[in-house]
Image: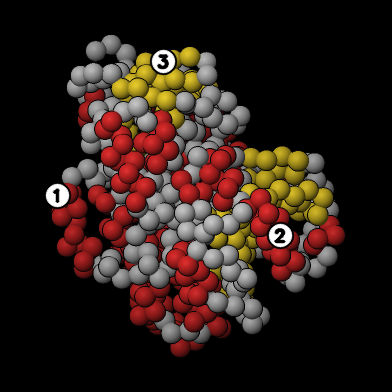
């Protein structure tokens, strides 16, 4: 056959992980990235001495990253340093209650005993349940492709035994009664684009994942991890082409067709394509000339998509020494707000916020005496809410910063740089369908076999990685999607 050539479209965590694994297996890989920097959603903004990670900031399951470096014969510690984050999250409610969520069993149980002493035994039973879910949902199935319905039938009894049909919030509520504790143990689906009342209980595995492996932050920010992965990829012979948006991909004839990738620089032929682009963008835009892609584009468009976000990146001239690295500020409503975001399609007057303050762990990300932040608020995606974000975005951002000032005195007067990213920007900057921040929503009916497959069933040589395919969003999810996808490529091309 000669040397195998692969194009990887998009340099997010999924695309980089796939590119590294394929290059390490002897495939000649060209990685195309539309933006001027690698990382996809893990882009980096720099302004006035501040460094802002645009996307993922919660790094869990570091073993999947270490395994990726090991696949190329390298050690992760030679490329990036991961710093432990403690507590994992500080949770704050409008009534003044706080909860420091950590991986230390004694500290976590002490917090539960303080907030909801009657729920301690229930929590212990819940944790035992999450360990079972983790063993099945992550260890056993997290990097296994579901290409046939029989693959789903094989695991159906195990999923039924774990009551995967129940929601995360519903499952948590069977073990603990205190409402604050229920929210503390059920917010995790929001980190991967899911509604806690609708997302499958399989996602309770995140609780065990964090307790087992910790929560980490790369020294220098998530962008430093991306740079380490790019360095690894180029060291083993990979070719990275930045500022090279793929305009279209044409499929040749035959059972092993060539894929012709067109960019502004010209056309190149490849034996296979791994797309880390938005899954709808892949079928509706990149392969728009291919009749076999049209059916999948329509199917994907009908799926339920995750919510979007408004994100504000801002730097201050002062420090806030009492901050946690990750703070979640719950609003006055929990389910009602979630229903507004995921169903009603309205921009609510209230909000829940996630505040990221990386300078708590790594002060080098801001000038001396300053603090780097981003704060995000989940909002409806563009398909459910007709909101003019050009007008609404700045006003909404002002309201968020005003609300934050109750927790961070003098905040607005100390801000020296600010950038707002809205659902409209997710659509235009990232090619995200409906401006969705996490691709296809993590519902049970859109999981495993029912999610867009790691290998396309109709177009030979087309493979998917990233949040839109199995297993789903989040850094461990997209890195494991690459492991699953490359395992299929290895079989298809006998690598």
Disc 3, SS:
strand
Tell me, yes or no, whether the two marked residues, 2 and 1, touch with CB atoms within 8 Å.
no
Residue found farthest to the bottom: 118
Q: Which sits earlier in the primary sequence, circle 3 or circle 1?
A: 1
Q: CA distance from mark 2 to mark 1?
A: 50 Å
Residue to which mark 1 is pinned: 150
Question: From the viewer's perspective, is 166 left or right of 23?
Answer: left
Tell me, yes or no, whether the two marked residues, 3 and 1, touch with CB atoms within 8 Å.
no
- Percent position of residue 432, x then y: 49, 44
Q: CA distance from mark 3 to mark 2?
A: 45 Å
Residue to which mark 2 is pinned: 395
Tell me, yes or no, whether the two marked residues, 3 and 2, touch with CB atoms within 8 Å.
no
In the depicted view, which residue is nearer to us: 200 or 356? 200
Question: From the viewer's perspective, is 34 left or right of 211?
Answer: right
Q: Quadrant of residue 128?
A: bottom left
Relative vertical location of residue 431 with respect to residue 185 in this rendering, above or below: above
Q: Residues within 10 Å of mark 3 (few under 14, many from 20)?
A: some
Q: Residues within 10 Å of mark 2 (few under 14, many from 20)?
A: few
Question: How did the renderer colour the structure?
Answer: secondary structure
Q: Residue at x 18, y 45 (%)?
A: 148
């Amino acid at each position: 056959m000669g040397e195998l050539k692969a194009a990887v479209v998009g340099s997010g965590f999924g695309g980089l992980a796939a590119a590294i694994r394929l290059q390490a297996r002897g495939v000649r890989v060209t990685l195309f990235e539309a933006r001027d920097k690698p990382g996809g959603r893990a882009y980096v903004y720099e302004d006035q001495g501040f460094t802002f990670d645009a996307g993922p900031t919660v790094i869990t399951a570091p073993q999947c990253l270490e395994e990726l470096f090991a696949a190329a014969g390298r050690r992760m510690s030679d490329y990036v340093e991961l710093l432990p984050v403690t507590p994992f999250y500080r949770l704050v409610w409008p009534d003044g209650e706080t909860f420091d969520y950590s991986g230390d069993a004694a500290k976590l149980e002490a917090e539960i005993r303080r907030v909801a002493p009657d729920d301690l035994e229930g929590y212990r039973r819940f944790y035992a349940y999450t360990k079972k879910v983790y063993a099945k949902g992550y260890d056993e199935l997290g990097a296994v492709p579901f290409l046939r319905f029989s693959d789903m039938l094989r695991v159906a009894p195990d999923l039924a035994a774990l009551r995967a049909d129940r929601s995360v919030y519903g499952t948590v509520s069977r073990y603990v009664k205190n409402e604050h504790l229920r929210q503390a143990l059920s917010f995790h689906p929001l980190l991967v684009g899911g509604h806690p009342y609708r997302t499958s209980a399989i996602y309770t595995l995140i609780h065990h994942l964090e307790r087992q492996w910790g929560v980490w932050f790369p020294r220098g920010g998530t962008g430093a991890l991306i740079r380490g992965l790019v360095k690894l990829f180029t060291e083993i012979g990979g070719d990275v082409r930045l500022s090279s948006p793929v305009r279209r991909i044409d499929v040749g004839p035959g059972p092993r067709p060539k894929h012709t990738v067109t960019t502004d620089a010209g056309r190149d032929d490849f034996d296979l394509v791994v797309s880390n682009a938005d899954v709808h963008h892949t079928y509706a835009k990149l392969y728009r000339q291919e009749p076999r892609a049209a059916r999948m584009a329509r199917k994907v468009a009908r799926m339920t998509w995750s919510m979007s976000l408004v994100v504000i990146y801002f730097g201050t001239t002062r420090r806030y020494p009492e901050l946690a690295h990750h703070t979640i500020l719950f609003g006055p409503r929990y389910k009602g707000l979630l229903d507004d975001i995921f169903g009603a399609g309205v921009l609510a007057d209230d909000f829940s916020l996630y505040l990221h303050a990386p300078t708590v762990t790594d002060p080098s990300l801001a000038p001396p005496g300053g603090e780097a932040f981003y704060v995000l608020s989940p909002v409806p995606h563009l398909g459910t809410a007709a909101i003019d974000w050009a007008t609404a975005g700045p006003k909404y951002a002002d309201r968020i910063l005003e609300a934050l000032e109750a927790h961070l005195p003098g905040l607005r007067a100390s801000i020296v740089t600010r950038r707002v990213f809205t659902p409209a920007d997710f659509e235009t900057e990232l090619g995200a369908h409906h401006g969705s921040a996490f691709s296809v929503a993590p519902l049970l009916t859109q999981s495993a076999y029912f999610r867009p497959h790691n290998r396309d069933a109709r177009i030979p040589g087309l493979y998917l990685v990233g949040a839109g395919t199995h297993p789903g969003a989040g850094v461990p999810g997209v890195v494991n999607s690459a492991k699953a996808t490359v395992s299929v490529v290895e079989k298809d091309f006998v690598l």
